[in-house]
Amino acid sequence: MRQLFMFLLISVILFAIAMYFILRSQTASAKLLNFITPSSAYTLEKNFIVGPSERDRVDFYFSKNDDSKNRPIIVFVHGGGWWAGDKSMYKFVAEGLAREGFDVAVPNYRLYPEVKYPEFLKDNARAIAAVNKRFPERYQVLMGHSAGAYNVLGMVFKPEFLQEHGVEPCFTVKGVVSLAGPTGFLPADSEPTTIIFPEKLQGSDSYYFGPDVDVPPLFLINGKEDTSVNYQNSVKLGEKVGADVAKVKIYDGMNHADPVVHFSSYGFLEGPTKADVIEFINALPGDDGDGFCR
């Protein structure tokens, strides 16, 4: 019996270690996490149509927490470098947030080579406007990882995309959470990014060099060990907009995938990211009639 117990204990430890290293890869982590993630915390509505393209679809994860209707809807936009990724990869993120009492909308958007900048921003704006039309009494918090973080930041730094659909971001978006977002501080110098962005994230497609606009509260997150999107992207953008608008947090030891992996409900995978994001959302100011932008 003792030998069997030791065998099982060692097996569990080895499995946990293997899981940890597998989950350091973004694609592998999403597939594996979705496989092991339960579905008991939410009710799923798939493929809500928001536009003419096959990728103009949104998945809704409605929390079974009765208080969710009194909270903003979180719109989570997937990453993938603007040429890969899909909303189906992020069940584990939506489940982790639904378990905390938030309704979550996860949209798709068109990808390269079908489209280039700024078409994916237009797609996300169309999806966010559709969510707003369906739930006009609910505010939104926009959150994205990697390319998706760039996209959600674009909804407030380039408000014209939402305004085209009759949505004023300053009165609809309570806050924006960027998980490892490439924002233009470092030039993009490899394909296909140089093709997708004609100005290589250093001109009108950068959030550093465009016109200054008022934006709602931002939470800019990066891992210090991120070799895909240097953490200085968050630091420099935070410096530009100021500490009264942007909260910046750089986590030691985290890579590119970690900030989003840590939204999993599995205890041994959870890191500080989810708790910090929820704290940020819960602390967002209420509506005083003047909007949320600063």
Image (cartoon, rainbow, N blue to C red):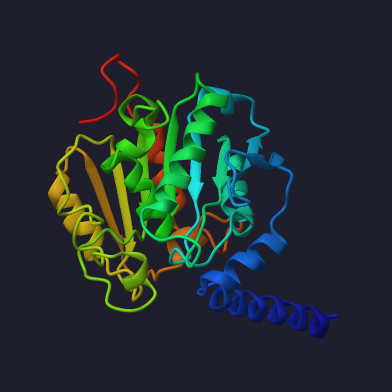
Task: Residue 277: give x, y in percent of width and height.
Answer: 41, 45
Instruction: Give coordinates of residue 99: x percent, y percent.
Output: 61, 42
Q: Is residue 124 visible?
A: yes
Does 280 appear above or below 35?
above
Seen from the viewer's position, the closer of residues 179 and 273 is 179
- Residue 84 placement, left or right of 164: right
Residue displayed at 64% across by 56% down = 88
Q: Position of residue 151 (x, y in %)?
A: 38, 51
Please state, as top left, top right, bottom left or bottom right, where the N terminus lies in the image. Answer: bottom right
**Identity of the residue drawn at 78% across and 78% down:** 5
32 is higher (above) or lower (below) than 149: below
Q: Quadrant of residue 206?
A: bottom left
Q: Residue at x 57, y 35 (%)?
A: 101
Q: Is residue 283 visible?
A: no
In this view, the residue in front, 138 or 92, is: 138
Q: Residue 174 occupies which quadrant of the picture?
A: top left
Name the residue nearer the viewer: 189 or 266.
Answer: 189
